[in-house]
Structure formats: structure tokens, C-alpha cells
Image (spheres, rainbow, N blue to C red):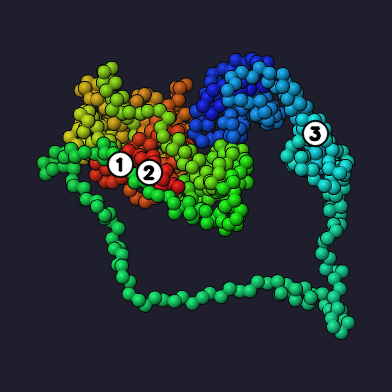
Amino acid sequence: MLEQLLIFTRGGLILWTCKELGNALRGSPIDTLIRSCLLEERSGQTSYNYDAPGTSYCLKWIFNNDLGLIFVAVYQRILNLLYVDDLLLSMKEKFSEVYDPKRMSYDELDASFKQLREAAEARAEKLKMLNQVAKPMGISNRRLGQMGIARSNGGEKKMANGKDGDEKDSDSLKGNGSSSHVGMIEKSSTVVKSKENGSSEKGAFDVSKLKLKSKGGKKNDTAAVINKVVSKTEPKKITKKNRVWDDKPKEVVVELDYSKEKGEEKVEANVDENGVPNLRKSMMDKDENVSSDSESEEEEESGNNNTKKKGWFSSMFQSIAGKANLEKSDLEPALKALKDRLMTKNVAEEIAEKLCESVAASLEGKKMASFTRISSIVKTAMEEALVRILTPRRSIDILRDVHAAKEQGKPYVVVFVGVNGVGKSTNLAKVAYWLLQHDVSVMVAACDTFRSGAVEQLRTHARRLQIPIFEKGYEKDPAIVAKEAIQEATRNGSDVVLVDTAGRMQDNEPLMRALSKLIYLNSPDLVLFVGEALVGNDAVDQLSKFDQKLADLSASPSTRLIDGILLTKFDTIDDKVGAALSMVYISGAPVMFVGCGQSYTDLKKLNVKSIVRTLLK
């Protein structure tokens, strides 16, 4: 049974809900759908599952991008309602006819909804019965649709010209009719049998019946004739042209040393001769200015590509006159180019494909303005989508949260997690250095009790930064060590406790179980995932499995997942910044820190505009 059907604008204004259903939804499935799918650019999905205490819902939706409307249907996940998609299409057509931006009430839609639902249920039942008949014959659902099984406002409709299956009806392909043709099924079955018996249709080329005569009136050999025809159709081989070397001397000599950038000074040491930290300003507190480069060259390039594909006159006429409504076929070339571009920037293929599907869903049916190109419209929509993804959904201000915890008389606890060799200890020291600049007392907890040399490495950082360290050696339970470190920080009055954990692969269940225990036992204020900026597709696997293991192995009913991301080695990837997008998209956690060097000051914020511009460059 359908639980609820809603119509609301993209701004969140509810225009109509079904009073006939009147079911009170448990939890907040609509809010979760907006927050988790629509705002996170996952609107290209076909459905969304929402779990609430005592029930679980399945949500399906459809857009009217020209009017900025969203149609959402909610039903119990255990029920397989086949008519929901058809009902949403019918409601979209009906509501688009009566929609007025100035109106706030659509009470007359209740009677129409009842009729449309009954019609959709009847069509779904007919299609289900026909599937049972056609399945033993091997006839697919698409073939059934070509035979005339679809929906219509005027009841049943026969195939064009009254012929059963000789010609395809265009309305049946779009889904605008409702009739069952038993003769078509019988005819299709006879065709299948005839093909199995080896009979050929008209127009097939039979070599045995080929009779060609030469000038003398004699028949030529069939094999020789075929070889002659094949030899004529073979393309000519393209010979490689000889390379012409330029003997003229080069006027400009390119410098081969790329270790230095123009205008960049070498960073000095962070400590003096006595080991006292030199508190220079960290890059976290510097505002990064991003130059707004002109994109006219890229637009000109995309315009030249469209001109080559569609022709100069057709593309120019379309850009001047505009198009009534954008179709998916119009968007596919531009989306394909954007997908390839994102993948070259190290974005995971799965993420790039989902992003393109979401952008297509947000643009399909939208009216195209005059003097615009489809490529520029798609690029603008993709840019807005990337900004929404990379912008944090909730504000995480560590300094503000530290002072709030200090007022409550407890330390602010940050746990650093991640795979092996990504630089957790080094970047923990960078975060500690940044906190020291803001007059925050820091203590480090050495909870990496597995890797040899981990405690000594952290001890060296603590000595250079002149901050206390809590350690218990190796082969100890890291959860107990972290708990004792927090108790020690409470007694000493430390503001922040930075917990260093052992690197572990996402598939190592014993170590993941120990990490889950540490988080459950100590309830840290922030769980920070440290990942490399050059991992590419592996970022999706790492983050998704880390979250999954933390959820599955948690002893608490309220699971604790990753809260933020710290990207390391960001200075080694040039323009391959796609890992940041993949990590944020798969986890929903923001990138809070970016490591871009080996000194304590080389820690900065993620510039969203710069990342988006680099991805689309």
C-alpha cells in the first residue's frame, strides 16, 4: 500500500499531499531524502531506502525541472509496488497542467489522484499477467512494450494501421497505450521457431545462389568472386610519414628543475638550535587567493567540438533560438566529456558516473535559454553540484568546540585513523602545531602499540613541539591507553588530546575491531580519517569499508562514523585532485585539513572553488 505522495518545490515548499492516504510517516524520510540524496547530488538514483524504528520505507521520486517541482512517493519497502513509477509520471503530467506559482492549494487534485492510481494499478496488473505468459517464450519486457503494453489517458489502443506487429507504434514505445495482443505473441513464437529451424528472412545474402558471368559468358568461381569483392572493399593501408626534424636552435631554454616554483621561498626550520619551536604562522590561518582565470578558451574549444559534430549552422541556430526542453540525448555528449575529464583528474569512475547521472536528472526537461550552448549549461550545473558536495553540510569549528569543552571541564579528544603509511603521526604533529599557535594546550597519546618505532616517532615530535606525551609502550590495548591518556589530560588541565592510532587496512578485521573498541570506549569528539590525495579509486574502498566496519563492529546502537578527512601529500598530485571529491562524496564528511609539505606549517584548509576549477579545467 502506498504510504504517502508529496509534491514540493526545490525550495522545500510543499504544494500538495494526498489527503486520501493520510498516513503519518515514522521518522523523517522526506528530510533524509533531501539531505542525503538531493543535496548530495545522488538524485540520479532510482530509489532510496529509509530505515526507521519499527519500519522501513522505500522512496521514489521524479523531477519537473522546467517548473522546479519534485514528486515523491513513499511506501513500505517490503511491498513491491509496480505501479509507483507509472503513477509518478501520471501525477507529473496532471499537476503540470494545473500548476500556478501563485497558488498554494490544489484540493481538486485528490479526485484525479484516485483515478490515476486505479489506472496505474490496472496497467501494472495487466503487465504482470502478460509477463507470466511471455516469460516461457523468452520475450522480454521491452518487446512487450513494443507490442502495445503501455499507458494511455484514453484507454486501450491498437497498433498503427491495424497490423499486429508489422509496424512499431511510436506511442507504444513511449508508454502511451494499454492492450495485449495474443496474436503478436504467437507470431513472435513462430518467428523464433523458424529461426531455430535455420530458415532465413528476406534480404539475406545466399552465397550458393550467386551467379556471375564473365565476358565470355562462362560462370566464374564463387570463391574467386567473393575474394575479388572483399579485396575491393579493403581500405588502403596508411603509411607512416617520415618525421621532419627541426635543425634550428631553440630560442627559449626550458628549465628542467621543477622542484622550485617561481615566487616561492624556501620554508625555514621550525625549531631553533635549542629545540624551541619557532611559532611561525601556519598555512591554516592564511587566506588563499585564487585567481579567476578566463574560461573563454575552454568554451571556444567546446564550441568547436559541437560545431564539428552538429554542423556550424545547426549549432549556431540552436544556440540563438534556444530549445524548448532539454532531452537526455542532448546532454549525453557533454556529460560524457565531463565524465572523462573528471576521471583524468583522479575521480573514481563510479563517482563520476553517479555525478553525471545526477546532473542529467536535474537538467532533463529544463528549457534552454537563447544564446547558450548545451556544453556550457552542463558545465555550470556540474560546477554547482561539485560546490554543493565539497561544501560541509555542518560547520565543524575545532577551536570553538575546544573552548566549549574547556568550559565543561573536559578535554577535546581527536582520534586519527587511516591505512598504513599515509602520514598520520606527521600530520598529527602539524595539527598540534596549529593548535599551539591559538594558545591551546595539547597532549599526545601514543596509541599505536603495533608498529615498531611509532612511539619513538611521536616522542620526537612531542620533544620538538615541547608538548607532553602519554605512552605505555608496545603490545598494550590501545583503547585502555587512550582512556588513561584522557584521564591524565583531565588532571593536568590539557585542552586537547590527540590520539595516534596504528595504520590498518580496511579489510583487517582484528585491527578494525580494536579501533571500533577504542572509539566506543572513549567517545572522542572528532574522528579524523587521514588519507592520501593520490589514491584515486582506492579512496572509495577505504572510506566506505572504514565506515562499514565501524558500524558493524560497534557495541553501541548509535554507531559512530568518520567525522572529517585530512588529506596528505596534496603537494605531490599537481591537478589530480579527484580523491578529495571521491572521499567527500562516499562518506559525506568534509575535508578539514590538507597536508602540503613536510614542515609543521604545511597544513592548510581546502579551497573549494580552487578544487572545482581544477576538476573542470
Do tag 2 and tag 1 residues touch (Cβ < 8 Å)?
yes
Q: Is residue 605 above or below residue 295?
A: above
Report the disc number at residue 30.
none
Which residue is under mark 1?
A: 288
Which residue is under mark 2?
A: 610
Residue 189 can be seen, yes or no? no
Q: Position of residue 583 (x, y in %)?
A: 44, 39
* Disc 1/disc 3 C-alpha distance (Å): 61 Å
Q: Residues within 10 Å of mark 1 (few under 14, many from 20)?
A: few
Which of the marked residues, 2 or 3, is nearer the chain's N terminus? 3
Which of the marked residues, 1 or 3, is nearer the chain's N terminus? 3
Q: Residues within 10 Å of mark 2 (few under 14, many from 20)?
A: some
For the point 76% across and 36% down, the residue is 176
Residue furthest toward the bottom? 216
Q: Amino acid at mark 3?
A: Ser
Report the disc number at residue 178.
3
For the image, the number of numbered tags is: 3
In the image, is 182 to the left or to the right of 93? Answer: right
In which image quadrant can residue 564 be found? top left
Q: Position of residue 163 (x, y in %)?
A: 87, 44
In which image quadrant can residue 10 be found? top right
In the image, is 310 to the left or to the right of 385? Answer: right
In the image, is 10 to the left or to the right of 615? Answer: right
Q: Amino acid at mark 2?
A: Ser
Nearer to me, 349 or 544: 349
For the point 58% across and 29% down, the residue is 69
Q: Amino acid at mark 1?
A: Glu
For the point 75% across and 73% down, the residue is 229
Nearer to me, 400 or 518: 400
Q: Position of residue 483 (x, y in %)?
A: 31, 25
